[in-house]
Amino acid sequence: MSTKIRTRYAPSPTGRMHVGNLRTALYAYLIAKHEGGDFLLRIEDTDQERYVEGAVDIIYRTLKDTGLVHDEGPDRDGGVGPYVQSERVSSGIYMKYAKELIDKGEAYYCFCDKERLESLKTTINTPDGEKTINVYDKHCLSLTPEEVKDNLDAGIPFVIRQNNPTEGRTTFTDELYGDISVENAELDDMILIKSDGYPTYNFANVVDDHLMGITHVVRGNEYLSSSPKYNRLYEAFGWEVPVYVHCPLITDENHNKLSKRSGHSSFEDLIEQGFVSEAVVNFVALLGWSPEDNTEIFSLEELVRAFDYHKISKSPAVFDMGKLRWMNGEYIKAMDFDAFYDRAESYIKQTITQPYDLKHIAEMVKSRIETFEDIPEMIDFFEKVPDGYDVSMYTHKKMKTDTASSLKVLKDTLPILEECDDYSIDNLYALLSVYVSETEVKTGYVMWPLRTALSGKQTTPAGATEIMEVLGKEETVKRIKEAIDLLSE
């Protein structure tokens, strides 16, 4: 096996990239790049029934958007291709190696029909209740070479099965979970080549990983139970076993497996919900791994330097939406304004149709939002004050205001604002500060009623004078008059 670390991401083109798959790709990338190794992309499309049109494009787009640049793949030949399994099938690679195992007595042809296989089903008790399993009874292993040849010549459909022992134990080593042993009696003779001539996922994985020189295999811990069968294949071929890194399960806040029903189980879901790709990558990296100094904000380059796969936890990782939102907010605050506006503009324009300074509004919200989807609700008052808003908002204990005092402030400041033509923040603040001094009240006593009248909202991304500057004189005066009428009722 190569002394240079080589990892791979081997997705099936079945739809959007699940967060768990993204983490697998990210960890495989980080393991390779931390040691100056190679990161490969291999498309595993042998399950034709689950193939989704356009899913390969999603894989490429997601890797590009997350910065996980592969060194080899279908579009970057490193000399061990093809990198698409369906293309490898047509070259006869898998059948060649399956027949090699048959010659060694490590695999055999199975001609059993569907009815016979159905008869082998049995029910067992598991911690989760009764479960129906199908354990093959090695019936076709006893066929003579002549019987096998006759069946093949007659065109009888067949699969090729792995010939696993029924006695003893098989042990394999995982970098996180250590040595794991299973009774060989529990190892079913799994199918290597299906009746359509395509390899099964497990068999193709082993063959491809060996031929591509993969040194470290990163995958979810749901594959732990399959690993003994993988190891027996490596041993049957006489190949070196790669380093296994099985990552912990990702759960939602209720400790259930993260599913599509959650609405945020894929990378594209999160981007559509207003998250930044760099924040998603950062967050996903921490789903099962953390540095010794508990740093939480990492660029991809910083992750490459810091990542140590030996520090991955064995415990399930919780997808904490609150933490992702916080982290995303930190990334948005740190964004270059032009880059921020490019992303925010569509959210602003879908909310505001008035000819306001949209960049000024973007500046207001940049440090206050956690996702881009927060923007519309935060700025919708610029378009229109909410109908029938609750006048109790004018009452504020800290500002010492109530509806009566607020009404007086609005009536007193209205003439000042009607006479003013310079609606810059500085000028508006100076004018209102004169009123504050003359009435010997605190600034908030005046600004709170004004801000409430202009927005009809409990919270806004800016103060009263900044809102006035955006609205302009005509709209500001109009809204204050409407608020006076509302409070007068």
Image: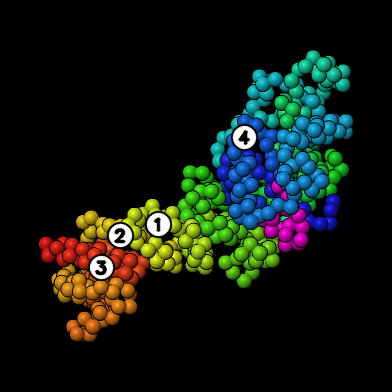
What is the residue that sits farthest to the left in this orientation? 489
Q: Can residue 378 be seen in this view?
A: yes
Q: As rendered, which of 251 and 27 lies closer to the eye?
A: 27
Residue picked out by circle 3: 473
Residue on which the image places disc 2: 381
Q: Nearer the viewer, mark 4 or mark 2?
A: 2
x and y percentages locating residue 323 in the rendered image: 50, 61
Amino acid under disc 4: Tyr
Q: Residues within 10 Å of mark 3 (few under 14, many from 20)?
A: some
Q: Give the range drawn in magenta.
A: 27-41
Return the x and y of residue 74 as percentages of the image width and height: 72, 43
Tag 3 and tag 2, C-beta contact below 8 Å: no
The residue that appears at 73% across and 57% down in the rendered structure is 32
Q: How far apart are marks 1 and 2 (CA)?
A: 12 Å
Residue 405 at x, y percent in the picture: 16, 73
Q: Tell us which disc is closer to us: 1 or 2.
A: 1
Residue nearer the viewer, 23 or 54? 54
Residue 457 versus residue 6 in the image, above or below: below
